Image (cartoon, grey):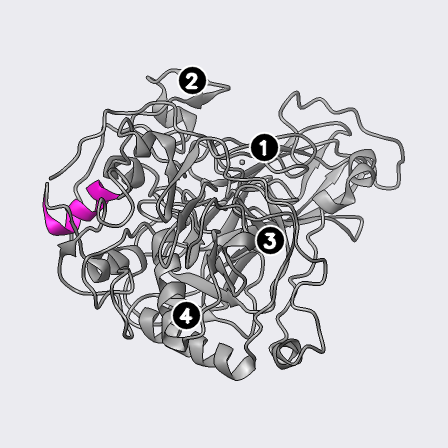
Amino acid sequence: MRRTSFALVVLALVPAAAAADSPAVDGVAAVDGYHPYAKRQGVPTIDLSARARAAAPERYLAEPTPQPDMKRLDRVMRGELPADPDGDQPRTGLPDGWVQRGSVVLPAGIDDGSLVVEPETIFAVEDIPGNAYPRKHTLFLNFNGGMLSSGGDNSAENVSQLAKNGTYPAWTQGEPKAVAIAQAVQADFAPFGVNVVYEARPDKVLPYTMEMMGGDWQDTNIDSPAGGVAPGADCGALGQRHVVYAFDSASTVQMANTASQEAGHAYGLDHSLDCNSVMSYCGGGDGSFRQGCAGLCEAACQGPNSAGCQLTHEMFCGADSFEQNDFDEMTWLFGTNEPDMEAPTAEIVSPVDGDTFDVGASVDFRAVVADNYGGFGWLVRVEKDGEVILDEPRYDREVDDEYRAALNFSGLESGAYTVTIEVHDHFGQVGSDTISFVVGTPGETGPAEDTSGGTTDPGDSGGDAESGGSSGDGGTVGSAGGTADGGGDPKGCECTAGTGPAAPGALGLAWLAILGARPRRRAR
């Protein structure tokens, strides 16, 4: 389906220079339209001084990606290892601004009918690198559980808006059943450009969805029983780093259906009345993402206004249809299942290789990044005199007003610097570029004066153009058997706007609750 161009829409995600006619807040343009997973966009300043790095080293160097151990699952099943080593943790309830209606958690504005997620807000951010459709994606099924912390969704850093702070329990029904479930979920997503993995966890650079497999609703912060829970109302799947949940079921088929449904909610799909769809409550057999338009199960499932992406569904089923075409919508988002054979590209345009700067100068880093599919992510690595001093995924995929990957460096001390950008896609391909520059006279010591005057990242609060995405990803929607992008993680990426407090610590960029909103139009 060919989309309509919406040239007049301005989103907070769009760089400020592209939104000069709109009122601004903290230098970021105000929004026309509403999307709970759109994010604040801006160029952060990172203090690279030795003093700043010594004060918070975890904010500069990413921890290695923990890998699953499927062999542990049989030992958990036999009781040789605890499924939940630290026991039950206190539940703190839903984030502020979100409500549960039946099995669904929604932004309060959508629930009361005052807000609508309009397709224009989705297409307004496509020019930001990584946001283009179709985009490849990865769904990681986590059967091993592990430590989670509460905050805006960031799958790479184990941060989830619905999580309690503590260990999420491991799968208790053994490895063979886990593998069977994973294979069934892979079959559900096989037509689309979504890799479903469970034996190896993606690297942190890659925007991916993590699904916690097992446990029950009381292992999260939702208010009432559910078969699963996931971020919702993420129309167009702007948040690419969601954490979703499929709770324990004795049935392999039901567990797989729930897992696929919760991932579908994270990608903007609502409940369907088609009993053969994984997006339905009524099916007892092996469901799938269905072709053809089927009625939305709103009032009959969880209450009025709970179909948070109705206007997006209308792009595929017609205005006022109140229907959803699972298959066409997933194909629009992720394309078909052809492999990605083309590596991403990266070119650093600032600073220039061989540049020299005075001690205390600020340096603007800019790079042109691209790929033939959306969904890619990047990291920036800085070495000083041969020592790596910054090596972090840019969860929020910050860009400047020319849509170039962008950071500002401050606190530069005398030395020889090398800066590398790596762009990763979902087929293991990496594009990179490296430049070097010199500050002062290498070998001199002493702290540099920070003359940037800008926002420091890491070390304060502050944002994916993640599609939305911190990505990069944030808010939450819950779902039973059904439902529940972009955040606030320990490293400060992917805080969600309007979904409760940002996560502590961190690189400091935040999700932005969209400032403007249109009256909700309901189709019947």
Task: Check the image and report above or below for 316 versus 11.
Answer: below
Q: Amino acid at mark 4?
A: Met
Distance between the alpha carbons at the discs numbered 1 and 2:
17 Å
State which mark lies toward you, 2 or 3: 3
- Give, as a three-letter code, the residue at label 1: Pro
User: If you read the primary sequence from the N terminus, does the residue marked by circle 3 or circle 4 appear first?
Assistant: 3
Nearer to us in this view, 9 or 35: 35
Q: Which residue is mark 1?
A: 44
- Between marks 4 and 2 in the image, the one whose residue lies nearer the viewer: 4
Q: To which residue does mark 2 refer?
A: 24
- Distance between the Cα atoms at labels 4 and 2? 46 Å
Crowding at label 3, few (<14), some or many (≥20) Cα neighbours within 10 Å? some
Q: Position of residue 379 (x, y in %)?
A: 58, 51
Range of the magenta residues? 309-319
Few, some or many residues within 10 Å of mark 1 (<14, 14–19, 20+): many
**Is residue 205 in view from this perspective?**
yes
- How many angstroms separate mark 3 from mark 4 (CA)? 22 Å
Q: Report the amino acid beneath label 2.
A: Ala
**In the rendering, which numbered label is found on residue 255?**
4
Q: Position of residue 17 (x, y in %)?
A: 40, 25
